[in-house]
Amino acid sequence: MIRSEHHGRVGPNAIIRVAEALEARQDRAAVIDLFRLAGLEGYLDALPTAMVDEQEVTALQAALRQQLGITAAREVARDAGLRTGDYLLANRIPRPAQTLLSILPPRLASRALLKAIRGNAWTFVGTGIFEANPSHPPRLTVTDSLLCRGASATEPLCDFYAGTFERLFRRLVHPDSLVTEIACHATGAPACIFEVRWS
């Protein structure tokens, strides 16, 4: 179990990639409206390049749902997660490590990837708690997810995480990997749980 000690700051991808995904699906005007609704107008001139306050990410996700409705917001959030995974693969995960993981049997690669994700969880869960269960199918758990904090819904809302995890598992563990959020705090569950399946 990993509890962040980094005072509620997370990586800027949770803001940057949402802007990219929304602009790709709609237009720049939609991004401007979203950032204004979330109280993040300061990022309209220049997106963040350093760690951001987790409350900004929570506000952005809430504004995304308010602006688009839950169904469309989930699609944008998942796309943003996929884009984040692409960024991590291109810029944060060393090529030799990617090569090694891609040649390992899926269950071994999964264990190694989960260990790496656990070690970097503070960059995306903020003050939340991250756990990873390497059994098959693997499960990743985020308690007090900043993506759905304060929200109530009839369906899971943490698609940004699901998209990020899925991109990493597809590229590094098995190309058929699917990540499903099987429990979400927004629906009344005690934590958000993501299950990974590839066969």
Image (cartoon, rainbow, N blue to C red):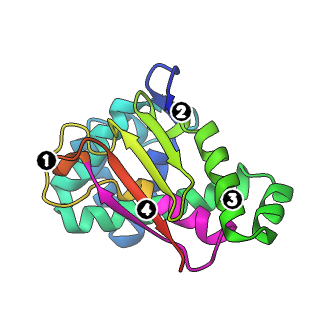
Residue 152 got which mark? 1
Residue 47 visible in rendering: no
Q: Which of marks 2 and 4 is nearer the N terminus?
A: 2
Query: How much space separates mark 2 and mark 4, taking CA atoms?
Result: 20 Å
Secondary structure of residue under mark 3 = helix
| Residue ID for mark 4 | 195
Q: What stretch is highlighted in magenta?
A: 163-184
Q: What residue type is labelled 4?
A: Glu
Task: Tell me the quarter of the picture where residue 168 sits.
Answer: bottom right
Q: Which of marks 1 and 3 is nearer the N terminus?
A: 3
Task: Tell me the quarter of the picture where residue 109 sits.
Answer: bottom right
Q: Which amino acid does label 3 sit on?
A: Leu
Q: Earlier in the sequence, mark 2 or mark 1?
A: 2
Is 182 colored magenta in this rendering? yes
Q: Which of marks 3 and 4 is in front?
A: 4
Is 69 colored magenta in this rendering? no
* Image coordinates for residue 134, horizontal then vertical, percent: 57, 54
Residue 89 got which mark? 3
Q: Which amino acid does label 1 sit on?
A: Ser
In the rendered structure, the answer to whether residue 39 lies left or right of residue 18 reads: left
Query: How much space separates mark 3 and mark 4, taking CA atoms?
Result: 21 Å
